[in-house]
Every structure is written in C-alpha cells, then in structure tokens.
Amino acid sequence: MVSRKQRFRTVLLIIILAVAIVGGVFGVSYFTDGVTFPWQVAATVEEPVQAAPEPVKEEPKLVIKEKKQDEAAKKEEELKKAKEEAEASIEKETEKTEEEPVDNLLNDMKLKYYGKLAVEDSHLVDADGHEVLLMGVSTHGINWYPEYASAETIKSLRDTWGINVIRLAMYTSDYNGYCVGGKDNQEKLKEVIDDAVEAATDNDMYVIIDWHTLNDSDPNEYKAEAIQFFGEMVRKYESNENVIYEICNEPNGDTTWDDVRKYANEVIPVIRNVDKDAIILVGTPKWATDLDSVLDKPLDFDNIMYTYHFYAGTHHKAERNALRDALDEGLPVFISEYGLVDADGAGDLNEKEADYWYDMIRKEYGVSSCMWNLSNKDEGSAMINADCDKLSDFTEEDLSESAMWLIDQISQLKHSDLEEGVDWIEPEVNNKDSQTKSDKESDLDENKKILQKHLRKIRDRR
C-alpha cells in the first residue's frame, strides 16, 4: 500500500512535468510568432494609430495613378491642339491656292514670236527669211464658247502652255452663226474677236480670224457677207503684224476647187487692197483635204497658204502620203485644224497615229498647226474636261489627254531655236555640198537632232 508521502511526491512530479511541457510550448511559439499573447492583443487595441502605416504605403500608388491620368489628359489636349492647328493650316493653304493658283504643268517655255511673217518658197518665214513654226490651238465656235477667247484664257495659255498662235473659229451658218444670227449677234462676235486680237497682241502671239464655213458647204453662199466682214477686219487690224485671215474653213459636199477659187479671187483682193502683205489661209475641198486640185490650179497671190485638216483617229498613212506629196511639190500648207481623236470629234486619243503625224508635220516638214478644240464641250476633241469651269491656270486634272499631248510636244522644244529668247542657229557653212550629212548631224547637239531635217531645209534655201 502506497503511503501518503509517496502519493504527494508523485503528484508534485506530474505538476512539475506539466509546467515544463507547457512552458516549453509557449517558449517555442513566442520565438516563432505563432501565438499572440493577451498582452500583445491589448497593446494593439490600445495603440490603433500605429496600424495606419498600411494606408500610408498605398498613398504613393494613388499619386502615381493620378499623375498618369494627368499626363494622358495633357497629351490628349496637345493632340487635339495639334489637329486643330493642322486643319487650320490646311484650310489656309487651300485658301492661298484658290487665291494664287499654282501651275503644276510641266511646260515652262514659250514658242518664239517672230514678228511680221511672209510665205517664201512654200514656207512660212520671218522677216529675215528664216523658217518659222507656229503651234497652238483653235477655239471651238466663239458663237457658243466665247469665254475661251477671252484675254484671261489667251494669256494663261501663252504663259503655261507655251503656244504662239490661237485660231478664232467663228461659225457662219450654224446656231448664232455670223450670217444667220442677226445684227446684234454680229456685233457680239466682233467684240469677242477684238478682245482676242488685243490679248494675242499683248502676249506676243499670232491670231487667226477664221470664217468657219461648215454646213454652208460652199463658201460662195455667204460671199457678200464674207467680203463685208473681211473688209472691216483688215481695216481694223491693218497695223497688226500678227493677224492671219482664214477666208473659209472646210468646203465640203459637192463644192469643188473651182468653186473655192472663184470665191477666193473675190475675197482676197478686199484684204489686199488694205494690207498687201497679210498672210491669208484658203480652205480646200473635201473638208480641207484636197490638195491635188490646188496643185493643178493654185491661186495667183503672194503670201497665200492652203489649209489641210486631219484627225489621227480617222486619217492615217494614206492621208499623210497625200500631204507629203503636196509638200514635196512645194505647196505652202498650214494645218489650221487637227485632232488626235476621230474626225467627228469623239473617241479617245490615238497616240500611235498622233506620233506619226507629229513626226511628219513638225520634225520632217516644220508645218505650222492649230489643235481643235479649246472648250469644255463633252467630247473627245475638247481640251478642257467637261467638269472644269475654269478659264485660266489649268492643271493637269483640268485637261484632256489631247491637251497634255500638245503641251508635252511644245515642252520638248525647250532650248531649241524655236524657243522664245533663243537666238537663231546660224549654219557654219553656206555651201551645203561642202559638208556631208554625217558632219552636219555631228554638229547638232542632242536637243537639236529632232529638228535636223527641218534645219537642213533652211540651210539649203540659204
């Protein structure tokens, strides 16, 4: 039997062991932060302000976010301001362009103005006997499109296209024609001509006054009116060395050369009685294509040239050969009207045939010419696009392919003797037999080679 003393010792030992175990557990937990003691809880409750550092740590994040938002807003404001400035600049440039149109055409040269002209040995020449070249345009009927014969348009074409001649096509019998539209209409047409002649003179250009017969196929139908008209014109422009008279446009139908010859023999003296030296152009039968009849029986006047018309879309090799034959026979020819489309004025530019014609009439023979037609009529031959209502400062977008083709051909003459301001090229040797053909060609620079045959003819005549 266990004594009381022994039981006491046993209980005491158990208590000591329990205290030791509990003390050990609390000691480990204290050093590993695993247990929060009552006095720690009390401290936290008593000092709540010290828990505030947590929000303080987040404060910088809030500041950064607000800063980014401010920067984004600032950039957006700058972009908006830049956009407004750009739009204002574009609007300002547009207004400037409208006020001061910028010419974007490639041609920056003008064809030469030669002064008083004459016809010599079948060629159009200047006062010194040097062959000249006129290249320009023909208006459509000034009865319908008088605005394109204005001073504004003529000056613009001289400055930006480089042309040196304009033809004023005045219809005689069609709607509002000179012979059928009444006296008031006649006065209006003469005012258009007067303004155009003055503008051409001011801009060193030649101007052709064209009695544009068409549906009145025989010019004799209105011969009396023609005599009165040209008598008035020549008295008005007697002192203008730049005025050329075309006494009938395109005799056609059954009209023969004998009919035209009879008409010309009565009209030409009216001009010659006032101006004995004026250049006069005479239309030929079959829409200004019958040169054979003229060769058989030419007119007996000085300073006369015969007109030939072609359209590259319709007239090809056979027509070129007919013209070549007449030129080789020494007939003085002026191409007062041509187009690069079909003969009816429709169709697209036939560039291949246009180049063939160009090589012949300019490079090979140096024949002067006027392209049809200066208007914005909705047809292939019109030089101004139908949706363009401008009268000057035309851009490439305003012009037809035909007009741009003409401008390109003129621009190719830059730095040649045909350019305004370039002196005439004097041949080194007057005797053409003293130089071989290859020698002459070697003396010409690259820009002159395109004119070598033309210049060789000039040298031969000298």
Image (tube, grey):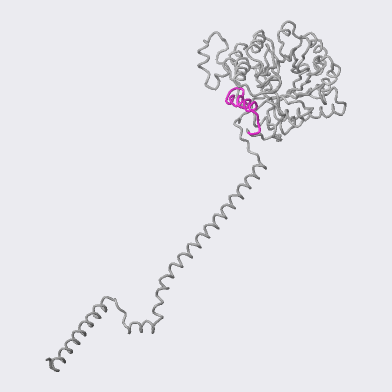
> Looking at this rendering, what residue extends furthest in the front direction?
1
| Outermost top residue | 296
> Measuring 76% from the left and 20% from the top, which residue is drawn there?
245
Rendered-image quadrant of the N terminus: bottom left
Quarter of the image holding residue 50?
bottom left
Residue at 20 percent across and 83 percent down: it is: 20
Q: Which residues are magenta?
A: 397-419
Residue furthest to the right in view is 183
Tell me which corner region of the image, top left, top right, bottom left or bottom right, holds residue 202: top right
| Place of residue 460 in the rendered image (x, y in percent of width and height, measured from the top left) | 60, 11
**Horizontal side of residue 186 vs 366, given as left or right:** right
- Residue positioned 61% across, 35% down in the render: 104
Say which quarter of the image contains residue 112: top right
Q: Give above or below for 113 relative to 389.
A: above
Residue nearest the viewer, comparing 433 with 271: 271
Q: In the figure, 6 relative to 206: above or below? A: below
Q: In this rendering, would 128 be left or right of 22?
A: right
In front here: 45 or 247?
45
Q: Residue furthest left?
A: 1
Q: Position of residue 338 (x, y in %)?
A: 68, 20
- What residue is drawn where x is 18% and y is 87%? 16
Residue 366: image location, x then y, percent:
63, 17
Q: Please provide percent x and percent y for residue 296.
A: 73, 5
Q: Is residue 401 above or below residue 333?
A: below
Q: Is residue 414 magenta?
A: yes
Residue 194 lies within the magenta run: no
Question: On the rendered structure, is 435 left or right of 17?
Answer: right
